[in-house]
Image (cartoon, helix red, strand yellow):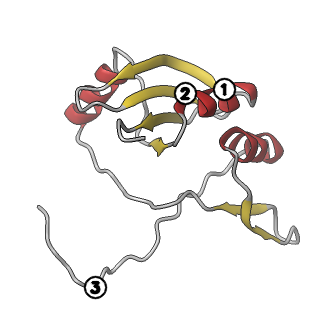
Amino acid sequence: MATSNPEPQVLELRVALTTEDYDRLVSFYCKGLGLEPAQVWPEDQGRALILDMGRATLEVFDEKQAQTIDQIEVGRRVSGKIRFALQVLDLKAAMERLTAHGATMVHPPIVTPWGDQNVRFQDPDGMQITLYQTPEQ
């Protein structure tokens, strides 16, 4: 159901992760993905930061599509209701950084039917993350 709307009604997608171990998860995403905080909020009401993750899109899957993607990337249905998919410039370097900062590999890299190289990880809090590199990179 695609529509062409000349003026977007949503300007930014933000995903908010809440964790029991703030320092661990901040280190994982900052150092593991090589990101610098775009904004750090004052600690008077709790700690928070914003990481600029580039362009954002929202994918909405039914259970059958989620099963299809998990089957391609991992060989079985393993992800939860939310999974990150992050396009990276250098898959090998991103894999090494994430692993060094506490990621658990769920499945080694595969080449998808559409030609991307994908690898599935899990962050220290259990969030599943697909890293992918397109053939053009």
Residue located farthest toward the right when viewing the structure as drawn: 44
Q: Which of marks 1 and 3 is nearer the N terminus?
A: 3
Dot 3 amino acid type: Glu
Residue at numbered disc 1: 96
Within 10 Å of disc 1 (Cα), the crowding (few <14, some 14-19, many 20+) is few
Q: Do residues under tags 2 and 1 come within 8 Å of each other at their CB atoms?
A: no
Mark identifier at residue 32 = none
For the point 39% across and 19% down, the residue is 110
Location of mark 2 (residue) = 121
Q: Cα distance, mark 2 to mark 3?
A: 36 Å
Q: Quadrant of the C terminus?
A: top left
Would you name the residue on which mark 3 appears? 7
SS at mark 1? Answer: helix
At 46% from the left edge and 71% from the top edge, which residue is drawn? 12
Q: Which amino acid type is marked by label 2?
A: Phe
Q: Is mark 2 on a helix, strand or loop?
A: strand
Above or below, comparing residue 17 to residue 37 in the picture: above
Of the residues shown, which amino acid type is indicated by label 1?
Glu
Q: Which residue is drawn at the image coordinates 46% and 44% (left, top)?
A: 87
Where's residue 70, x and y in %? 34, 25
- Specify whether 35 is left or right of 68: right
C-alpha span from label 2 to label 1: 11 Å
Give neighbour class at mark 2: few <14, some 14-19, many 20+ (Cα, 10 Å). many
Front tag of 1 and 3? 1
Residue 26's place in the image compared with 129, above or below, is below
Relative to the observer, which residue lies in front, 3 or 118?
118
Instruction: Answer with mark 2 or mark 1, whichever residue precedes in sequence.
Output: 1
Q: In this view, does 9 lie above or below 1?
A: below
